[in-house]
Amino acid sequence: MMHQSTVETLPSRPALRSIAGMERRTESRSAKDPFATMGVSVAFSRDEEIYGQHESAALLYKVVSGAVRTYKILSDGRRQIGAFYLPGDVFGFESDAVHGFSAEAVNDTTLRVVRQSALTSLAEREIEVARELWKLTAAELRRVQNHSLLLVQTAHERVASFLLEMASRGRPGQEIQLPMPRRDIADYLGLTIETVSRTLTRLESSDAIELPSSRCIVLRDRAALRRLNG
Amino acid sequence: MMHQSTVETLPSRPALRSIAGMERRTESRSAKDPFATMGVSVAFSRDEEIYGQHESAALLYKVVSGAVRTYKILSDGRRQIGAFYLPGDVFGFESDAVHGFSAEAVNDTTLRVVRQSALTSLAEREIEVARELWKLTAAELRRVQNHSLLLVQTAHERVASFLLEMASRGRPGQEIQLPMPRRDIADYLGLTIETVSRTLTRLESSDAIELPSSRCIVLRDRAALRRLNG
DNA sequence: CGACACTTTGACGCACTTCAAAGGGGGTGG
DNA sequence: CCACCCCCTTTGAAGTGCGTCAAAGTGTCG
């Protein structure tokens, strides 16, 4: 559950002129980043709910440390994960007044939080802010479109694309530290944990990757992985 | 191919104050609709390309009559359709300078076309226009999210959801006139034409729908269809 | 009327799921 | 510090929904 008392006392004086600092991986403390100037830090423990589907979307979040998943429960009880958000990523922004997905902390996570109303009212006067909010939505649109394309691929292609995605978002290098368990990967890719596990095993035996531990994956042959994805 | 000569002579004087008239099914000729005041009509014949993937996204389109599909070709040669646009729908808007999908006319189609630059430059001065452009992107985001959720469902659920979607977008009533062939439906739902055909046949034998002809579908039991979708 | 494109139907194969059980790996208590 | 336990992951075997391949049926336009 959210630390309401802390969040409710968000300072809302508009001390910024742009929200250009919102992009992924930018942790700038400059006056331009509303999360630095207007934000409040909130901690969530593993599997804790950040917000629920259909709750009003009053806040905008930036991941400081940890990881977040957004998801929906389908009518048959399956859980579909819509996105993972890693340090530097911004999430929780909705054009609707209400969240379309629920959000949970994958691990112990620290977020920086600002009121959406502070930004949208600021956008009324500052075209630059409006543009940044629009860019945020457009980036989400591209991300979801890519995710859509993933979901019509084979299991091998989905897993390979997932690994390449995580590699590009993590610190540069061959080694990926996965913040989430197999269950989350499966629900993100629309597969079962068994299929994800088997696919990783087969990628390892074909020397495309190494699996030193279940949460650590070393990319040995990116070209082979790319050959699989669309 | 596009009728370049016509399109190149688009009038670009900004005679509007808002693009509120852009929503689906709005065909208003009021001064508020930029497609009416600034637009040019262009005709496309069946299967004609409107724009290609990676082409620069200079124009914004509104369907007057007919239907449009956007798609990508996957690495294995399969075609994934991203969306269908019906009369009243707006498409072709990109935050990037470049189209992420290709667009084709499903049937003989008439479009109303405006320059994106005319709108984005107008948005610099008119916050109302900026808001409408952002709403357009947000609506696309929701549409793609729903489509994503479709793609992890069973064939029956996908087809049922598709029928309900088309019913809600077509003229009210139980009868759906499909503008597209089975191949397009299959590529939109991530299935084969055989599976789509078999699924429709089974929905007919379970009395959920009737199939007077291949392009006409009558919804007999919407509740049964809804029970299937997520 | 015939040619062609689209749709439907059938038989079979395969990729992924389901069901089941056997490994790890990390944390806690003895 | 070791041992036990719990959860996560891996592996195996069997089932199934959808894809593939093949052919027949249907509608449309020259």
Image: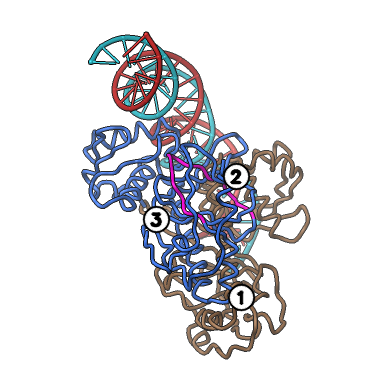
Chain colours: A blue, B brown, C red, D cyan
| Residue B98, magenta (yes or no) | no
Determine contact: label 2, label 3, CB under 8 Å. Answer: no
Q: What amino acid is at disc 1?
A: Thr
Q: CA distance from mark 1 to mark 3?
A: 44 Å
Please determine whether, in this image, residue A181 is positioned above or below residue A114: above
| SS for dot 3 | loop
Residue linked to disc 2: A52
Please determine whether, in this image, residue A120 is positioned above or below residue A112: below
At 61% across and 54% down in the image, what residue appears? A57
Residues at discs 2 and 3 both on one chain = yes
**Residue sitting nearer the eye, D17 or A98:** A98
Residue linked to disc 3: A88
Magenta part of the chain: A98-113
Residue A116 found in image quarter = bottom right
| SS for dot 1 | strand
Q: What amino acid is at disc 2?
A: Gly
Determine contact: label 1, label 2, CB under 8 Å. Answer: no
Query: Of marks 2 and 3, which one's residue comes earlier in the chain?
Result: 2
Q: CA distance from mark 1 to mark 2?
A: 43 Å
Q: CA distance from mark 2 to mark 3?
A: 22 Å
Residue linked to disc 1: B110
| SS for dot 2 | loop
Residues at discs 1 and 2 both on one chain = no
**Residue sitting nearer the eye, A107 or A224:** A107
| Residue A104, magenta (yes or no) | yes
Please determine whether, in this image, residue C15 is positioned above or below residue A11: above
Q: Position of residue B88 (x, y in %)?
A: 66, 70
Residue B60 marker: none
Q: Position of residue D6 (x, y in %)?
A: 44, 19
